[in-house]
Every structure is written in C-alpha cells, then in structure tokens.
Amino acid sequence: MRYYDKLIFELSRKGRTAFTLPRNPYGAASLPDKLSRKSSLDLPEVSEVDVVRHYTNLSQMNFGVDTGFYPLGSCTMKYNPKINEEVASMPGFMALHPLQPASTVQGALEVIWNLGKSLAEITGMSRFTFGPCAGAHGELTGLMIMRQYHMKRGDLARTKVIVPDSAHGTNPASAAVCGLQVVVVKSNERGLVDVEDLKPLLGPDVAGIMMTNPNTLGLFEREIKEIAALVHGCGGLLYYDGANMNPLLGIVRPGDMGFDIMHLNLHKTFSTPHGGGGPGSGPVGVRKGLEAYLPVPKVVRKEDGSFDVVRDDEDSAGEVSGFLGNFGIILRAYAYVLMLGKQNLRRAGQLATLNANYIKESLKDAYKLPIPSVCKHEFVFDGLIDNGERKDAQGNVIRQGARTLDVAKRLLDFGFHAPTIYFPLLFHEALMIEPTETESKETIDAFIDVMHKIAKEAEEDPAKLSGAPHSTPISRPDETRAAREPKLKYE
Ligand SMILES: *Cc1c(COP(=O)(O)O)cnc(C)c1O
C-alpha cells in the first residue's frame, strides 16, 4: 500500500489545520442549548496539501472519460465539451429558485421554450416537456400520455403494450409501473423486430408499441414504416425510446418514421456528464394532436411574446415532477445544439456511426459477431472466446479461452474502460461497444490493438485474463455483494 492510499482519517493529527481564520472582533455568538453540539465533530485534522492529495488521489481511483477512452454501449457516454459546464454554472442561471414567479425568470423560460423548439425540429415532433428527469421517467410519462389519449377517447380496453425482446429493461418496467400489461415481440435472425411475430399480437386491446431505433444491437429497424402502419391500423400508438438518437441526428426523424410519442436522453445525446445514477433529463415530445396530454407544469408563450407557466390543464396526463425540469441539463443541451448547429449535429451522428463500424470490421476476425450487418453508433459481439479443452501435465482438463467478463476486466490494465457487458440479453456473452464521435482515429486504433492483444492472450495465457485486472486499486470484487452490501463506512 502506498502512503497516500491511507484514509484521510489515518493521516489526521490533533491540532493540524488547512486554514487560518481572521481574528473574530465580535466575540462568540451564543446558540440555544438544544441546538448546540454536545461533543466535538469527528473530522480529520490535516494540512492543506494532505487535503489536496486526498481528493486528487480519490479522483484517480476511478475511471472517467476525462482520463481515458470509454467505449460503454447503450449510453453515449461521450466526452462533453467543457464550455457547456461553464454555461450551466453562470450565476444568472445557477442562482434561480424554482419557486420564483414567471415574470422574474423570463430568460430561463425562453431557454426551455427555444430548446423545445429545436428538439421538435430535430425529431419531427410538435411539442416537448422537460419535466421527466431520466430516460425511464420519460418512458413512464410517455405511456401516461398514451393512456390518457385512449381514455379521453373513451377507449378503455387498451391495456397492452408491445415491447421487443431486444428492448432496454426500463421499457417493460415503465409499462408495468404505468399499470399496462407487457407483451413481448420477438427479434428475427437479422436482429430486427419480426413483423410476422408482431401481426397476431395486434388488436383492440393494444395501447401501443415501444421501440428503440436503432435498437439495442445498434441496428436500424428497416421495417419501421410497415410496423407503424400495422400498429396505427389497430388503433395503437408508437412510442420511441430515444436513447439511441445519436446516430440519427439530422438524418432521420422519429416523427417521419411514424412515432407519436418519444423521449430523448439529454444526458446521452445532448451533452451532460452521465454516471453514478445522475443527473439526467428525459424530455418527452409528442406529435401534433397530442400536445394537450403533456404533463403540467407547461411553459407557454403569450401573445405579447412573454412566457408563462401553466399549472392546471384538465386534459393533461398529470404531473411527473414538481418543477420544469433539471434546468442545468437543459442549459447544457441548449448550448450544445446552438454550438454545433444543424450541419455539425448531423456530422456527430455520422462520425459515431463510422467509428463503430470501423471497430466492428477491424475486430470481427478475433471476436464473434453474431449479426454482421452495418451498424449505427454501436454494435454487439458475442464475446466468448472458446479454444476448446486441453489436459495439463497432471491430466486435469483445462478449458481454454475467455469470457466477456475477462475481456472487459483485462481492458482496464491497458487504460481503457470496459464496454457494456451482458446486455442486451439476446446473446449469452454480449459485449457492446460504442466509441462515440469524439474519439480520434489514433485512440480507436490503440483500442483495436489492445483488443487483438487480449484475444491472443486468451489463446496463450488465459490465466492472465481470468485474474485481471492486475493494475487497479481493487481487482475483482464479489459483484453481487459489492452492490447489495456495499461497505461505505470507515471502520
Ligand atoms: C439508457 C437507456 C434507457 C434508460 O434511460 P435512463 O436515463 O438511464 O433512465 C432506456 N432505453 C435505452 C435503449 C437506453 O439505452
């Protein structure tokens, strides 16, 4: 153990401080007895340099996109331009209070209004709400709108939602939370929704279908027009899970594909650091004719051009959050859209697609590629490397090769974060790679090189993989216990 791997409590020495306060000319204020502390706070007593080293070392024990390539799939964990952080921390925005009257926050309301307009143009929807604070929250909101639409028409029999077997787990979960029944539609051998499997599921009890396009395998659902016609034909609506919108920016619009309701993950596609469970923003958009069902509060533009917030609306599907949304994230997205503009948003999607296909083609000889077609911004290997069995000197049978988990762990030794593993559930050893548009060819080539090296190790020295990572502060925790019984306390 290095000296600075010690806890800050262990570095503590009585009386040592990192600050000096000016002499207090006023004397001590007295607090009511019931409010004052009875024993002293148990804080570490250290010098300034110890504090700085403590936090700097802590920041380097974890892996982040600021320190290395992060090919995690289904996330668009991109490098986000730092200027967006600056915009989000401008005092005029940061010091706002969510309960301020509309007349005093006209600038903030204008930002929300304008971003809504931009997203509507990008997606082919009519109006957006920014209430939902995550993609999953957006799904729930969208399904509430779908249910409200059917209920307002007096059509109470529509209780089923169709979800592809390739869907993100939040899709069926949101449907269940919304009180709807989930029906699964299968994928075909090309990894796309099987239209023949879909047809018999459609009927007067179907509220709608939830789809991700490109889907979680990174494949564009080519038959989306036919699917839309079939679902609309039975009276259902189409919900678009926009988590994979990145490669379609400026190229295809969900509204033009036939979708009625959708969410975007601003923290995936429109620049916000995304990790540790938040912060997030999952704005929901609806096509023309469904605007009335959007949740309250709603931002509206008045005749004189000023903005107001409407809090009651009898057609609305209800309230999904107390205020207008996660405003710091809205600001980052607004800055990002304005900074890139139409042409460069399109280019971001094209580069993300090019980078993913380049990696896929460069590695498909070393890793099993179950669906070999052109992908969008991400793709999935079935990561098992199976080199059969051999007998060692004592006659014991040794399986040769590596599992996806081993490949992912070994990448850390080379300074790359692991891709997403064991998702989607369609393949047992799924390994999902999403490079994003921000990485240089040199970085991507270095990653490809390392992946080749690891495939070779699986053949020649499998123990090196099953024991990896060898260079991180912690090697292989018991993943279940680390999640279920984390030890977060100093003992
Ligand atoms: C990330 C993701 C979601 C859920 O979004 P959160 O913001 O994490 O709630 C839903 N669907 C897909 C395809 C995703 O990748």
Image (cartoon, helix red, strand yellow):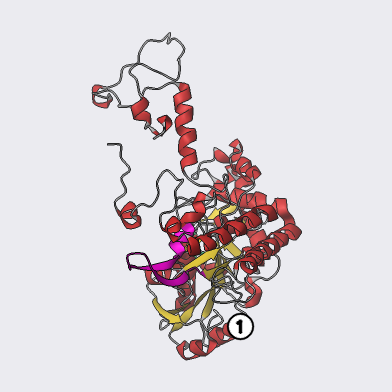
Q: Which residue is mark 1?
A: 223
Residue 33 covered by magenta stretch: no
Near-viewer residue (489 or 62) = 62
Near-viewer residue (139 or 444) = 444
Residue 288: image quadrant is bottom right
Horizontal side of 123 relative to 243 (left or right) equals: right
**Residue 208 at x, y percent in the picture:** 49, 79
Would residue 74 be visible to someone looking at this image? Answer: no
Note whether ligand 1 is within 8 Å of mark 1.
no
Question: Eyeballing the image, is 330 above or below 369?
Answer: above
Q: Residue at x 45, y 18 (%)?
A: 19
Name the quarter where the C terminus is drawn.
Answer: top left
Name the quarter where the N terminus is drawn.
Answer: top left
Near-viewer residue (114 or 86) = 86
Other residues around mark 1 within 10 Å, as few (<14) / some (14–19) / many (≥20): few
Residue 386 covered by magenta stretch: yes
Residue 16: image quadrant is top left
**Residue 39 at x, y percent in the picture:** 24, 23
Which residues make up the magenta segment? 382-408
Residue 364: image quadrant is bottom right
Q: Secondary structure at mark 1?
A: loop
Q: Residue at x 47, y 71 (%)?
A: 387
Near-viewer residue (211 or 166) = 166
Q: Residue furthest right?
A: 343
**Residue 422 at x, y percent in the picture:** 44, 66
Q: Residue at x 47, y 91 (%)?
A: 200
